[in-house]
Amino acid sequence: MNTTLRTLALAAATGLAMASAGAATVSIPQSALNASPGVYTPGGYYTNDIGTNIVTTGGGNAANIGQADGRNDDGFMQLNLGFDFSFFGTTYNSLYINNNGNVSFGGGISAYIPSGPTGADSPVISPYFSDVDTRASASGVVHYKLAANELVVTWDNVGYYDSNGAPLNSFQLVLRSDAFLVPVGEGKIGFFYENMLWEDTDTSEVAAVGFGDGLGNAEVLQGSTEDGLFQALNDKYVWFDANLDVVDPSDVPEPTTLALALAALGAAGFSARRRES
């Protein structure tokens, strides 16, 4: 489905859901995923500068609140962004980084059963909603890098419940402010995946990827909460624009179109100068 049709479909589905007090879900096709190795980094991350580890401020089982190394299970950390970020019609300047593969707005999420973005009770962005557990010594932890208009959250070589340190998953979320000047072929939100080697945990056998508004309306990647999603994500990435539409990285202006646009701008500038003279 093209960008315009997907935007209209989401708006119509959301309106219908509100009218019927139900919930609507828009599917993101797996064909939107692109090969990630070598695009931004050799391994497939957007950036290898992953910053510092989270230190949890709340959460559920073994949240290890305040533990300096960030190892926890079902914990979360509140973070002030220092910029505005609009999501499902609301503008936020803070969020919660949740250990279980997502970030949320208005409250932390310690839920570990990946019912998907449709099942979250807060607005949520889920690169990989599953029962992440970083307590094993062989597991990495969750990191974040906050800049003036961009946040990068990385679940770097993380294990799963119950304290399993192998196999490991590596995935990254890029989140950009409303004021960020997005380069052509990129987006406001990015999901990046390196080695994705697990989805089975001691509590569930699936994972979920996508966006939810906390009221049951969502955009969800095809294959979420189904067997084999982790294999589809392995070594892939995807960008989304402010409307949560997929950005095609190859969708750049054709040379002829670009030349015409520049010519039009030049003509407009010349006309303006003539009027001023």
Image: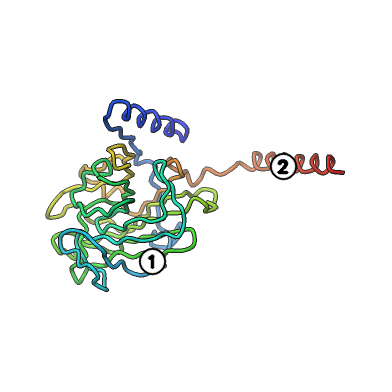
Which residue occupies the foreground of this view, 185 or 58? 58
Q: Amino acid at mark 1?
A: Ile
How far apart are the two marked residues, 1 and 2, measured between alpha carbons? 40 Å
Residue 209, x across and y down, in percent: 30, 46
Residue occupied by mark 2: 265
Decide: is 66 above or below 29. below
Local packing at callout 2 (Cα closer than 10 Å; few below 14, some 14-19, many 20+) is few
Decide: is 148 above or below 199. below
Q: Quadrant of residue 13?
A: top left
Left or right side of 259 for 54:
left
Decide: is 148 above or below 204. below
Left or right side of 151 for 252:
right
Please tell me which residue is depicted at 26% across the width and 64% down the height of the picture.
57
Decide: is 181 above or below 265. below
Which residue occupies the foreground of this view, 173 or 111? 111
Label 1 vs 2, first from the N-terminus: 1
Q: Amino acid at mark 2?
A: Leu
Please tell me which residue is depicted at 25% across the width and 53% down the height of the picture.
109
Q: Quadrant of residue 5?
A: top left
Residue occupied by mark 1: 50
In the picture, the quarter occupied by the N terminus is top left
Left or right side of 209 for 41:
right
Residue 107, x across and y down, in percent: 29, 52
Q: Secondary structure at mark 2?
A: helix
